[in-house]
Amino acid sequence: MEALQHSSERRSPEVAAAIEDVERLNRGALAQMRTMLLELRGEAIEDVPLKLLLRHLAEATQSRARVTVQLSTAGEASLPAHVHVATFRIAQEALNNVVRHAHAATAQVKLELGSRGLRLIVTDDGCGFDPGCPVDPSHLGLVSMRERAAEVGARLGVTSSPGGGTCVELEWKRR
């Protein structure tokens, strides 16, 4: 697909768009496959660097939906296994919510690691929601993120407003 896209042959805008879509889907499938292979190989998620897991997650999300995902990471620190896994799963669920509900054009994932703990922020420019309204019981994303955060002693904040996007912020402090 890359060779086809970069060839000098003239194409209609529709064909060029279709080639771009297939290339985007291929990149995403490759990112999802990498993550699945890590899990299927028997290698525990906590043994894979969190930055790498988030990069695969961002690439896979970008390919599944027309959402540009910007990833930024800073710092280095080893985390307890349960915190590592919870952080990845919360980021995964936050991006799943972006794809399913936000109708966003862009999302940002920011991870800050340090000796004192970590901070994960996932934001989008989507439709947002009213946090004061009850959540549909069939939508378990927010509930599972809160449960995972509580299990590791982290603070999870979710801010949103109709038309104003959503921000999910996880903060864990080393004790």
Image (cartoon, helix red, strand yellow):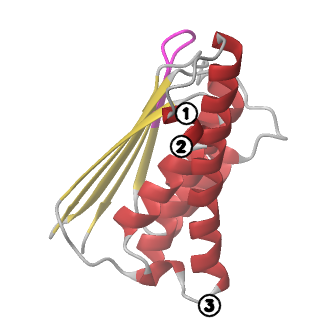
What quarter of the picture does the C terminus occupy?
bottom left
Q: Residue 93: percent from the left, percent from the top?
A: 61, 49
Seen at 64% across and 11% down, the residue is 13
Give the crowd class for mark 2: few <14, some 14-19, many >=20 residues within 10 Å.
Answer: few
Which mark, residue 5? Answer: 1
Cα–Cα gap, marks 2 and 1: 5 Å
Which mark, residue 2? Answer: 2
Q: Check contact, mark 2 vs mark 1: CB within 8 A.
A: yes
Give the crowd class for mark 1: few <14, some 14-19, many >=20 residues within 10 Å.
Answer: some
Give the crowd class for mark 3: few <14, some 14-19, many >=20 residues within 10 Å.
Answer: few
Mark 2 or mark 3, which is nearer the start of the sequence? 2
Q: Residue 48: percent from the left, percent from the top?
A: 43, 78
Seen at 84% across and 41% down, the residue is 138
Residue 80 falls left or right of residue 126: left
Amino acid at circle 3: Gly
Seen at 37% across and 73% down, the residue is 49
Which mark, residue 42? Answer: 3
Cα–Cα gap, marks 3 and 1: 37 Å
* Above/below status of 105 relative to 43: above
* Above/below status of 113 relative to 108: below
What quarter of the picture does the N terminus occupy?
top right
Describe the element under mark 3 as helix, strand or loop: loop
Question: Residue 136, can we see it?
Answer: yes
Mark 1 or mark 3, which is nearer the start of the sequence? 1
Chain part drawn in magenta: 158-167
